[in-house]
Amino acid sequence: MPGLCSHAGRSVRAVLCAATFLSALVPATAQQMRRATIWDLKLGEPIAAQPSPNEFRGFACGSNGGAPRQPLTGWRDFARCRAEPDGLHEVYFEYDDELEYIARARDADREITRWAGTTEVAFPVVVSALFDKTGVLRAIRMVTDARPEHRNDITEANLRKRADAYMLGGIMAARFDIVTARDCTSSPPAEGESAVGALFIKQSCEMNDAANARKIILRVSFYRKPGQSGTNPQLPTQLTEGQFESSARLEIRKIN
């Protein structure tokens, strides 16, 4: 969050900004608060047209939608990241956490959830920007974040768990008018794969949005991989935890 608050330490910033933020938490009478997100990036535009790096944090080289690699200072360091097979350089970034820390200073539960971490509709996500060799943004990428949380906050944000991650796919499909019958294909289980309860989802969707000169690519998964099981093989009455693949992956690519 740029401005006065960005020049102090985190705890000091919360104190400095709390008074200003108080009225913003009161609905119907306050100015709408917001922070920059992946949707503020401008496909097909150069770095100069992108939001200021001060609007985000945690810049690093990406790993195809996974955890961050080499730290960066901002968009302009994109060339330090190894190019993907299509020649694009992935820059990982995180959403600004200023409003979250102010909400925590006020013990405002709903606002803590609203501004917690890098999230979309309460789903933790990994977001990244992909630049070509000239510094033009050619694609954006969003993948549900499977990394476990290790924070020890007094008030836990009410975020969706990994088991629900595949549900973000339906939300993104609706956002971009993806029609399952027209734009998606479903794959059957491969050898060793199985359903989670009654659900087995391996779906791939692609749609050309000609009006905006872009391609929407969506992948949704919810199933058990080979070797994963809902129960302990040595003790069938004991349920396992986390033995499933649940994810949603969205890419929006600029069409030349």
Image: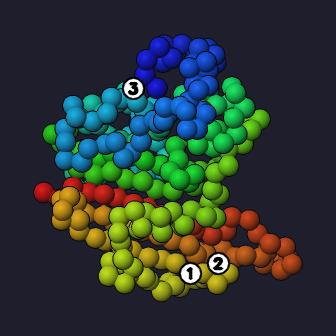
Query: In the image shown, does 88 or 128 lie closer to the viewer?
Result: 128
Q: Quadrant for the C terminus, please.
A: bottom left
Quadrant of res 193: bottom right
- Residue 85, quarter of picture: bottom left
Work out whether 252 lies above or below 21.
Answer: below
On the image, the x and y values in percent for residue 128 come to: 38, 46
Q: Do the residues labelled 1 and 2 touch (CB within 8 Å)?
A: yes
Q: Identify the amino acid type marked 2.
A: Val
- Labels 2 and 3: the sequence-earlier one: 3
Residue 69 shows in the view: no
Q: Could you say whether the residue bearing mark 3 is in a helix, strand or loop? A: helix
Residue sitting at x 43%, y 22%: 2
Contact (CB < 8 A) between labels 2 and 3? no
> In 3D space, how far apart are the residues under numbered discs 3 and 1 (Cα atoms)?
42 Å
What residue sits 34% from the left and 58% below the top?
Answer: 251
Q: Would you name the residue on which mark 1 appears?
A: 200
Residue at the left extreme? Answer: 256
Residue denoted by label 2: 196
| Residue 48 x, y percent position in the rendering | 21, 31
